[in-house]
Every structure is written in structure tokens, then in C-alpha cells.
Image (tube, rainbow, N blue to C red):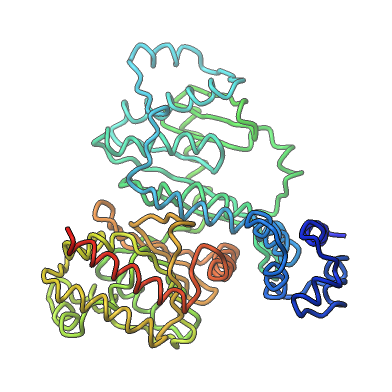
Amino acid sequence: MSEFSQKLMDCIAASGYSIYQLAKEASLDRTTLQKTAKGQRLPSLDYIKDICRYMKISQKQEEELYRLYQIEKLGKDTVASWDEIHQIILDIGEIGKKTNSNLNIHFKQQSFHHFNEDITREFSTELECMKAIMCVIEEELEEQEIPEVYMDVSWASQFALDQLMQSNSSQEKKVICHQLLNLRCTDEKRKVCLENIKMLHQVLPYAFTTTNEYDVRYAYVRENEAEEKFHLWPHYIVTKKHVVLCSNEKNHMVILSNEQIAEVYRKELDKMMQGYRLLFDYQGYSGEGIKKYRKLMDSDETRITYEPFPCVALMIPNEIKIKLMNDKKLGKIATAFFDLPLTKSSSFINVFGMKEIRKFICYGHLPGIYDQYFNAESKELRKAMLDNFYGYMSSHARQFYMINEKEFPIGSSFGIEMYGKRQVVFYSTSKELSFGFISIDEPGIVEAFASYFSHLIDSKYVYGIEESITQYEKMVDQLWREMEEN
């Protein structure tokens, strides 16, 4: 008996029903219900939802039952990857807010001198390791004209990235950061590799918060966890003067403080990088970046768009779109964003939030970078734009799913788009960091995001298609009333 079937049996017992009584009450096939409870059959999720409607169980118990069902059907790694991706979205949503004062360490020259007294040092507590890594990064930032850091993905590199992230505001220097990811090979079925998503979780938030040069590359490895245990020092951070060698444990590492040794490591890493592929393909809002974005959009594959604000391209009236598309400065950008893609409407899934919609209703300001190009000054234009979007929803021009922000408090500075199962794109709409978009075509990662969005639109985090229309209309009407009352 699986965890799911055992949980189902417990829920049925707790509800006071027998299997026969529940099947009769819910008008369900008794044989199917019996086999499901015994772990002999796994029906559809809709069937499980029908059961839950009649069992007197808490929302928490119901959610746990759904989760165990998904694990039973798709495997623990797939469900764990959904959790990881969900947290990635939440973390990126904190763009501009991620400051950790506990890690904001600045050292005096006396501290640097003391730190460099020994060529080789071993650290055996987590606190010692953290302080030492911070000191290595701080010294690189202080002493080098062009700071440059090499690292892989580990607990140690997370400390280093946190320190570099804070250097954006405290340092005028541009920092070069190279990070190499050893992604695990996905099998011929493109099974989700949880380790790959965990690595992406470390690098994506930094990519969305840094103005430094961030060079992230990946290669495939066939090592498993058992083989990794035989590595002497599996992780590293290398600067101009230091080589940090780290174990898999957070309380054990060695630092070699020697420029000649560090130079040898850097040269070897430069050679290694030639065999790695770029993970992030940074694009801009002009030139080749826009051409590539346009090519991605013109696809007849399923397309998924996740954005924190109703689609601007569907809100702005056609006459204003034409004006922006004919503008000498903004023409290419406007064309890329306002021309609707060739994707069939039935294949286009639009997941959207209502972040900053209050500000738009009150002042006519669009979120992030869009506000630099267009402002809806009159109330009439704002209402027309909101009605335009409502019209698209009501006509079912796409599959619209409105985010339930009581359950899923999203950020407001980025979006995600998927083009079939071949590419996932992250784009920034932040005024502070308008780097355009990052595209990833690593098969395992793309497959994981496709799976996540399929799960998302059937979860508590978004409203259903019809409910989304109702909730949108209700929220917009309420915000208008509040503005007029004030």
C-alpha cells in the first residue's frame, strides 16, 4: 500500500464513511474506490477531487492527499521540482529587496593582514567557513581593480553570491563572476532532474539582482551522489589571491592564500570553461535581442506566459500600439511586444497577477519599464484599457488564469514565458535592471518548468478560467469604487 492509498483510507475512516457509503453518497463506482484505497488503481485527479467533496476533512488534509497523489503518479522528484520552481519565483519576486545585513561584512586592512598570515588554513565550523568566504570576497572587491571570482554551485558559493549582491550598492567597481554548473544528465525520457533545478535556484535570483558581469555556463556530468563522496574537495571559489576548497558539508573547507597557486587554478578554469555552454543567453530590448524574441514568439507550439500584471499588449488600444510601433526609438521594441504571436489561441496559456493594478487605476502608471514608454493619463483611457483586457478574457482568446495572490504572493518585476518544450525565457520589467530576457534551452530544466505550469493551473494558486473572469471584474470594480470614494 502506498502513502497515498494509506492516507486516503485514513481520510475515509476519519470522515465516518465506509467505502460503500462514500461511493453511494458521491455516486462513484465502488470497485474503483476500493481498488484506489487498496493501492491497486490510480484514477484521475478529478476522481480524487470528487471523493474529497464528500469527505469531511480539513483543507490541510485535502492538500496533503493531493500532494501524495501527485507523488504516486509522477514521482517525488517531479513534485519536489515544483516546490523548488515555486520558491525560485518567490525569491526572484523579492528583486531589489534581497539584503541580508547579517552577511554585510566589511573588513579593515588589519583584518586582511591577519587573515593572510597563514598560506593554508582549515575551517571546521559553519560560522568560521561563512566568515572566511566573506573575507575572501571582500578582499577581492577591495584590492582588485577588476574583481573576478570563479565558483561552482554549492553552499559556499551561495555565501559568495550574497556578498557580491550587496557589493552592487556599496562598490562602484564592476565585478566579473564566473559560475560553472555541472548539470546531471537527463535520460532519454527527459526525466526531471531535481539537482538541476536546485542549481538554477541559486543562480537565477542573483541574475535578476546584479548589474555585474555574470557569466554562467553548464556542462553535463554522469557522476552520481555515491561517486561524489570520493572527491577530496568537490567545490571551489577562486579569486586573485585565494583558492577556497569546500566539502559537501557546510562546516569543512580549506583556503590556500597564494597568488601563484590561485593563478594556476584560474588558468585551468579558463580552459575548462571552453567546454561549457552558456546557460543564460542575455538579450536586450533592441537589435539582435528583439529579433530573437520575435522569432520565439512566432511559434505554433503551446505557449505559456506568466506575468505579474495583465498583458500590456492586450490592454493598449490599437491606435496607440501603431503610434508606438512607428516611433523611431521604440519601434522594434513595440513591434516585438505588441504583435500577437502566431500561436493558436487554444494553445496559449496566460497566467497573470494583479500586482500594481491599484497604482494603474489611480495614476495611470504601468509597471516597471513599461511606464517609461507609455502613461494612461485620463481615467477614460485607463478604463478602456482594463475593459480591453476583460474583453479578451471574456472571449476566451487565450486560456486566462488569474493568480490567487492570497495563496501566491508574487513579485512585480519579472515574467516567464515558455515556447513548447524547447525553451524557457525569464524577462525583467524592472526599471532598475532592464536587461531584457534570459533564455534557457536545457531540456531537463525546460521539461521541469513545463510540468510545473501544468500543475500550477490546476492548483489553489490560480483561479479557474471562468472564476478568473469573475475575480478580475470584481477586483477592478472594487478598486474603481475605492478610488472614487477617496
Q: Quadrant of residue 250?
A: top right
| Placement of the N terminus among the 4 image quadrants | bottom right
Residue occupying image coordinates x 45% and y 35%: 160
Quarter residue 79 falls in: bottom right
Note whether 326 is above or below 53 in the view shown: below
Q: What is the total number of numbered labels drawn onto the structure image? A: 0
State which quarter of the image contains the C terminus: bottom left
Residue at 30% x, 39% y is 168
Vertical comparison of 361 with 332: above or below: above
Q: Nearer the viewer, residue 28 or 157?
A: 28
Residue 248: give x, y in percent of width and height.
64, 35
| Figure check: 98 above or below 73 | above
Q: Is residue 242 left or right of residue 385?
A: right
Q: On screen, 118 above or below 44?
A: above
| Camera-nearest residue between 215 and 80 | 80
Q: Horizontal and vertical percent for residue 213?
A: 34, 47
- Residue 46 at what x, y percent from top left? 67, 75
Q: Depth check: give the residue in front, 61 or 454.
A: 61
Identify the residue at horizontal 59%, vertical 19% (top origin): 122
- Tell me the residue at 14%/76% (across/down): 380
The picture places residue 203, in percent across and down from the top left corner, at 47, 49
